[in-house]
Image (cartoon, rainbow, N blue to C red):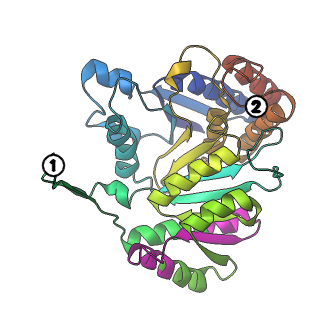
Amino acid sequence: MEKKIAVIPGDGTGPEVVAEGIKVLNAAAGKFGFKLNYTYFNYGGENYLKTGIILPDNATEELKKFDAIFLGAIGHPDVKPGILEKGILLRLRFELDQYINLRPIKLYPGVETPLKDKGPEHIDYVVVRENTGDLYTGAGGFTLKGTPNETAIQTSIYTRFQVDRCLRYAFEYTRKRNKKKTLALCGKTNVLTFVYDLWERAFHEMGEKEYPDIKREYYNVDATCMWMVKNPEWFDVIVTGNMFGDIITDLGAITQGGMGIAAGGNINPNGVSMFEPIGGSAPKYTGKNIINPLASIAAAAMMLEHLGENKAAEAIENAVIYMTSNKMKSQNAGKMGYSTTEIGDMVVERIVK
């Protein structure tokens, strides 16, 4: 059965890593006997600078027609920070109701981590970040802006509905992952006594009633950050709110070798989901063919797994592991030992063989 994929190459090095991801997707599709049909959308900084349009009014309705979205990167040095992020990324997450941000924190063999005496056997867990609430809803504003008495307010907002559906996804994911069968809630109940009181009550109520086979743990966010560095092997699945999730997933990315290897998904379990490399658009490397495409390739594998093509997804991940274990000198741009396109070609070769 043919699967329809919306492709947003985006800005900077986004189109370069997307091209390698598509190359690998096509190889996997050919190997495992399914078809992918791509439609490209030019959303991003260049289009905004040319047309003044951040995202067309009909964008989300168009994207709902696809099985998944494959994203490169959004971010342009000539566009003020926040315009593209809010106007494209947050808008798509909210309007497509991609209420889960799924971030595997997995150290591949051969990849260096800044954590002393830690290896792939220690760093292999997943963060489930709620993706549509919290401080990101935009509730708040200014009074007396530009005066000595200026006041800025930004409010964290969660409904029980939002919390419950995120927690249910996390419990189900922990059960399906079937490793330590431990779900940890990352919060801040000792200070944020309203929002994370709601999260903690919902967490334990759902766990006791519906998931007695899943062990539950609770960590304050500051302790979570400490243990992600000191004892990453403790974790199986972490579930948390939008703001804390944004922070701890970047911490997790550096422990798994950096943005060049980290991938993630913005998930709507009942709609269209979007998959992307975690690193930004890296404009200083644009056109140099030296950026690491493995994060985009790993995102492609996540997308295929989400679409039910598990064997193809596993083959891509195994090819990535082969590259990090046997071929690449570094994960950093310009130090990999191969060009962007050469790495894509070698991943394809490994999949085909």
The residue closer to the viewer here, 224 or 87, is 224
User: Would you name the residue on which mark 1 appears?
Assistant: 145
Please say if 89 is above or below 121: above
The residue under the point 66% across, 33% down is 297
User: What type is the residue that disc 2 sits on?
Assistant: Lys
In percent of width and height, residue 330 lies at 76, 29
State the residue position of label 2: 31
Q: Return the residue found at the far front.
A: 148
Residue nearest the viewer, comparing 49 with 224: 224
Disc 1 or 2, which lies upstream in sequence?
2
Measure the alpha-carbon separation of dots 1 and 2.
Answer: 59 Å
Badge 1 crowding class, 10 Å Cα cut-off, few under 14, some 14 to 19, many 20 or more, is few
Considering only vertical position in the picture, is 122 above or below 337?
below
User: Could you tell me which residue is drawn at 48 percent across and 82 percent down?
Assistant: 201
Q: Position of residue 61 (x, y in %)?
A: 33, 42
The magenta-colored residue range is 172-201
| Residue 150: % across, % down | 18, 53
What is the quadrant of the N terminus in the image? top right
Most extreme residue toward the top is 288
Residue 336 visible in the shown view: yes
Q: Secondary structure at mark 1?
A: loop
Residue at horizontal 33%, vertical 37%?
A: 59
